[in-house]
């Protein structure tokens, strides 16, 4: 796994493994390696929010998740379809892209709420476009450009939104400490 850069601190002084995790991603391969580690934590009902500017690597991350979960086919951004569904051996993965939503309720009106938090896994790009009506995520991942790290360098900031997300971060920290 890519090395953690730092853990954000807060005035509440969270336990060492309960705060956000920041990971340096030197290239697309590092993004895919992080995704593969997160993939091992996914299970039915898991909700993952993916945020970041255009081109920051959200679809690359999702491709890495799917590859690690054994999906061999083409992985495309659901920018125009709003959702792509992948039938995996353990669960269905729904890859949403809310970039083109014009209102907070558009995803509800499309009937997507039945796909989030149920028996599948929901990976949601641009969740801020529907924030008021989305359930809380288990994990939030924000991909940002790292201007000091080179043309392809990114930084991933992971934050738990549930006890399940906290456990995921704890395991990611343990895996990075072993590297």
Image: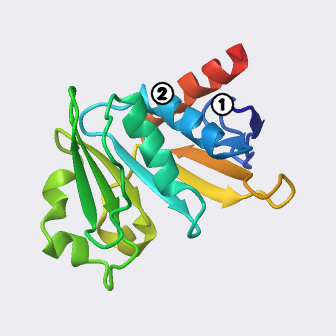
Q: From this viewpoint, is residue 139 visible?
A: no
Q: Which residue is drawn at 61% across and 55% down?
A: 143
Q: Is residue 176 left or right of residue 106?
A: right
Instruction: Give the numbered dot on residue 167.
Output: 2
Instruction: Give the numbered dot on residue 124.
Output: none
Packing grade of label 1 (10 A; few <14, some 14-19, many >=20) is few
Q: Mark 1 points at which residue?
A: 15
Q: From this viewpoint, is residue 106 visible?
A: yes
- Does residue 178 lie above or below 66 as drawn? above
- Does residue 53 lie above or below 135 as drawn? below
- Does residue 89 lie above or below 143 as drawn? above
As helix, strand or loop, the secondary structure at mark 1 comes to loop
* Residue 119 drawn at (x, y percent): 17, 38
- The Cα–Cα distance between marks 2 and 1, rounded to whole angstroms, is 13 Å
Out of 143 and 159, give the one closest to the viewer: 143
* Residue 170 drawn at (x, y percent): 56, 26
- Does residue 146 lie above or below 40 as drawn? below
Residue 104 lies in quadrant: bottom left
The quarter in which the C terminus is drawn is: top right
Out of 4 and 78, give the one closest to the viewer: 78
Q: Which residue is drawn at 30% across and 41% down?
A: 73
| N-term-proximal mark, 2 vs 1 | 1
Q: In this view, does 78 lie to the left or right of 3?
A: left
* Residue 87 drawn at (x, y percent): 19, 39
Residue farthest toward the top in the current orientation of the protein: 178
Q: Is residue 94 left or right of residue 54?
A: left
Out of 162 and 139, give the one closest to the viewer: 139
Residue 41 lies in quadrant: top left
Residue farthest toward the front in the current orientation of the protein: 73
Packing grade of label 2 (10 A; few <14, some 14-19, many >=20) is some
Q: Residue at x 56, y 55 (%)?
A: 57
Task: Tell which tag, 2 or 1, sits nearer the viewer.
Answer: 2
């Amino acid at each position: 796994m890519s090395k953690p850069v730092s853990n954000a601190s807060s005035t509440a002084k969270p336990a060492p493994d309960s705060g956000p995790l920041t990971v340096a991603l030197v290239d697309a391969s590092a993004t895919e390696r992080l995704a593969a580690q997160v993939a091992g934590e996914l299970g039915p009902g898991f909700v993952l929010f993916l945020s970041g500017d255009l081109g920051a690597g959200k679809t690359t991350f999702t491709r890495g998740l799917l590859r690690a979960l054994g999906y061999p086919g083409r992985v495309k951004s659901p920018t125009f379809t709003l959702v792509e569904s992948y039938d995996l051996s353990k669960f269905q993965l729904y890859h949403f892209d809310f970039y083109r939503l014009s209102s907070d309720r558009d995803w509800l009106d499309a009937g997507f709420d039945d796909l989030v938090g149920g028996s599948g896994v929901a990976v949601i790009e641009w969740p801020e476009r529907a924030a008021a009506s989305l359930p809380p995520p288990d994990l939030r991942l924000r991909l940002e450009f790292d201007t000091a790290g080179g043309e392809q360098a990114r930084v991933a900031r992971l934050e738990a939104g549930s006890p399940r997300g906290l456990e995921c971060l704890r395991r990611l920290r343990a895996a990075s400490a072993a590297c």
